[in-house]
Amino acid sequence: MDAEGSEGSPGAVGHAMKRLVGILCLAPALYAHMMSMSSGDIRITGQRGHYELRMPLYEISHLKDAGESLLDHIKFSSGGQAARLVAKSCRADDATATYFCTADYEFPAPVDRLEVECTYYAVTVPNHVHLLRAENGGKRDQGLFDFSFSKATLRFSPPTPAEVAVTEIGAGFGRALGGLVQILFLASLVLASRSRRELLALAGMFLAGQLVAVWLVPHTGWQPAARFVEAAAALTIAYLAVEILLLPEAGWRWLIVGVLGGFHGLYLLLFLQTAEYRPTYVLAGAFTGELLALAVLALLLSRIGRIARALRPVQVSASLLLVVGMVWFFLRLKS
């Protein structure tokens, strides 16, 4: 390793700082991008239900009749009997870049438990997450819906501490592994490590970067845009792939990964702000999922490397990640 790549040398520190500046200078260009999340509220009064949906406009730009399509993908029932849609209204608010829908439902009988089926991911993007809050006679419950959990029963009874912990830890676990960007970045993290010891260091810095972002950003007064967050996460894949391909012996990579982890932490922060979950539980679930995924990916890639060493799997995989990261970035730029 030359002097520039030695972690303790002044040249290495300067080189690492230049790379950090390069990452941060990209930030202003990322504001044209998005992350897939919507929210809704339903208020139950006797046999009537009033539902309000808030969907980012960029999620439904491809739909000809967004109001009809969206409301066709959420169903309410109670006691196994479906609620009847009796009125609906939708409008776009360009000022907030949000699409609003309201809908009124009539149930066959007073609602005790609310059964919900939500498949918004089918008409938006596969990683779409919908947070639904429900109220019935002053009692509240809420559910998260995505491609892996499209059905839920809301019971309007105070959850036990154990139920809260399981729900919120599970939500963190799902959000950490619920999108292609997250999985691809973890794969690039494994590829970027040149030893088991370095993988542990990179994993630790990645988690630390997320933790710092979740804790620090709310104190700055800055509210990161969802489009910025998803684009930043996509671009981290491409940047780390460039590190692997063009700077294979570079030092201080752990510092770079810590900064990149901060961008991924913004996604968890937005989720926490939307869901109003406890950061401790959500982060515990997210970190558990990420560490498990890193362990599995490291095992798989190490076996592939031994079997197909002549094919240079690290370089080939990094090249593919670079292409995917950049394509993802430009697709978000056009959306």
Image (tube, grey):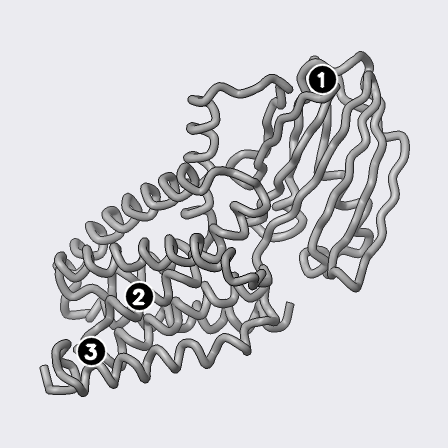
Residue 47, given in percent of the width and then of the height, sits at 83, 18
In the picture provided, is 202 more to the left or to the right than 124? left
Residue found 54% across the figure and 73% down from its top: 30
Indicate the quadrant containing the C terminus: top left, top right, bottom left or bottom right: bottom right
**Mark with earlier residue (3, 2):** 3
Mark 3 residue crowding within 10 angstroms, few (<14) / some (14–19) / many (20+): some
Q: Is residue 92 above or below residue 25?
A: above
Q: Which corner quadrant of the image does residue 173 belong to?
A: top left
Q: Amino acid at mark 1?
A: Ser
Q: Amino acid at mark 2?
A: Val
**Mark with earlier residue (2, 1):** 1
Q: Is residue 97 above or below residue 315?
A: above
In the picture provided, is 174 more to the left or to the right than 3? right
Name the secondary structure under disc 1: strand
**Mark with earlier residue (3, 1):** 1
Name the secondary structure under disc 3: loop
Residue 136, given in percent of the width and then of the height, sits at 73, 21
Residue 314, given in percent of the width and then of the height, sits at 23, 68
Residue 252, given in percent of the width and then of the height, sits at 21, 73
Residue found 27% across the figure and 69% down from its top: 255
- Residue 78, label in figure: 1
Q: Which residue position holds label 3? A: 250
In the picture provided, is 160 more to the left or to the right than 53? left
* Mark 2 to mark 1 CA distance (whole Å): 48 Å
Q: Residue furthest right?
A: 87
In the picture provided, is 323 more to the left or to the right than 328? left
Q: Which corner quadrant of the image does residue 317 belong to?
A: bottom left
Q: Amino acid at mark 3?
A: Ala
Q: Which residue position holds label 2? A: 257
